[in-house]
Image (cartoon, grey):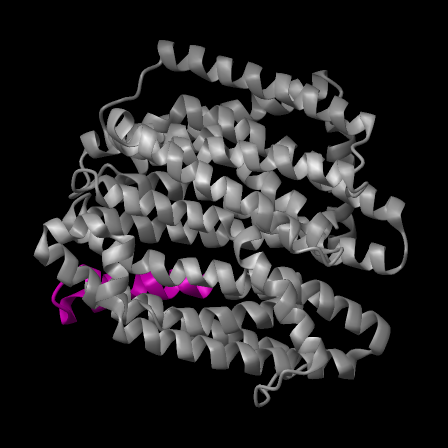
Amino acid sequence: MLRNFLTVGGWTMLSRILGLIRDQLLAAFMGAGPLQDAYQVAFRLPNMFRRLFGEGAFNAAFVPMFSKVMVQDGRDEARLFARRALGVMLAWLVFLCVLGEVFMPQVLRVIAPGFLQNGDRYDLAVSLSRITFPYLVMICAAALLAGVLNGLHRFGVASAAYLAFNVVGILAIVGASPFFPSVAYAAAWGVTASGVVQLGLLAWACEKAEFGLMPLWPQLTPRIRLLLRRMVPGLIGSGVGQINLTVDTIIGTLLPAGSVSLMYFADRINQLPLGVLGAAAGTTLLPVLTRHLSAGDIQGAHTAQNRSIEYVVLLTLPAVAGLLVLAGPIMIVLFGHGSFTEHDALLSAQSLRAYAVGLPAFILVKVLSPAFFARGDTRTPVYVGVGVLVLNFILNLLFMKPLAHMGPPLASSVTACVNVAFLVVLLLRKNALLVYGSTLSHMGRVGVAALLMGLGLLGLESFVSLPAIFVTRALWLVGMVVGGAVFYAALLHALGVVNLSDVVVRIRGRLRRKVG
């Protein structure tokens, strides 16, 4: 599981780095203003549906069922189930896409009410949204194919295909912009084109795995009905984070122009650890838990859950400490160029700190949710999700005026913490979570190491301030990150969390085997 965790995490990290380059281009060309706001809303809509219907509710219901059919009924029956599921999904998505294209002006009135105060920004958002909306059809179908590949334990191929989104996006912004009215139009067409490329790559990977998935005509067989019953309540349970972000966007459009952009770029940095660790943990843990539970190995399921929690905490807490201390320099170095001013970067850093507070909770939701899904329970997270959505909306309204662009991110962070607390309590009551004493000890020592690292960075920053020239700024930031990582590793060794000597020996052993 750790190898698969690192494989998915490695590909996701590479995708996030390319995504960072793409976002830097968006910031440099469009800055933080009405044009950027309109594009971000246009992208948020299909992206929300992708995570709800593709990576969220559908995968949460599909992957355990697919894995179980594979184990109990064989490869051919699992392939038939996947083809039928793909046919049903495509029929629903095409219908949804047509509705979206026709009623896009009305949809934008709901998710971006603040744009109505500026007719040009509203009209632009409608045009861009109609360009990007077909992306949801391709990417949701791609998510199903990726789920099949994950069920076949081909984690690397499924994760690598998602690089196409950022590669195509970068090419569209840099190469296609002169042929469109603005960069926003080029970026929007890049989104839809990337969906076509990703779906094609994953379809090819399935063929290479001798698991071709030509969709079948939609048919509600008993197995497909069970899939839909598990999926529908999961739309809220597994999509709470995305719905919360959409609420943040709605509130952001009611704030001064540029607020949506400030929160977006902050969230993109927050998504580096969240996307890498959350995606890796959730993607690799769900099939593992399903396999253990299908075999009746309850102890193995508990052990896998504890290991995932330990991995996530080990890598998340130092990220939180680093983001809280270095948010300003990070945003200035990465985005403070071109139309995105240094002042914009510092404002965005305030949103980043608000997001960072809830980072462990955001990721733990992705680690705890598979414990329900692997047991075929997609209903329980729904009840938690409804309460969380209501709480998030209330907090957004309370924070909107006094905190401006920091309000929605802070509301999401508080909401995520409450979500985790409820999930833990419910899992404990169901005897679906058994946290070992060693895991609690591990979390405590990691917390101490992360706190000391953060204090060390804070002290160092007060002595060595951020330089004025970009090159020296970049070197300063790299030095702070590397220095913090080395200090954190030393603290982990001193506190007995990891033995660096053992790590070095294992790395050398693997290198020798590869050379040999």
Locate residue 391 relative to residue 511 in the image: left or right: left
Asked if residue 493 shows in the view, the reply is: yes
Residue at screen point 70% across, 34% down: 425
Q: Judge whether 468 appears above or below 293 on screen.
A: above
Q: Nearer the viewer, residue 19 or 287?
A: 287
Q: Nearer the viewer, residue 242 or 306?
A: 242
Residue at screen point 73% across, 40% down: 427
Q: Where does residue 201 sit, x and y in percent of width and height?
A: 51, 75
Q: Judge whether 311 appears above or below 46 on screen.
A: above
Locate residue 124 relative to residue 406 in the image: left or right: left
Locate residue 79 relative to residue 417 in the image: left or right: right
Q: Nearer the viewer, residue 482 or 402?
A: 402
Residue at screen point 47% across, 28% down: 357
Task: Find the magenta span and give its range.
Answer: 163-184
> Is 428 inside the magenta-drawn segment?
no
Q: Where does residue 100 sit, x and y in percent of width and height?
A: 32, 71
* Residue at far bottom of view: 217
Q: Judge whether 486 appears above or below 456 on screen.
A: below
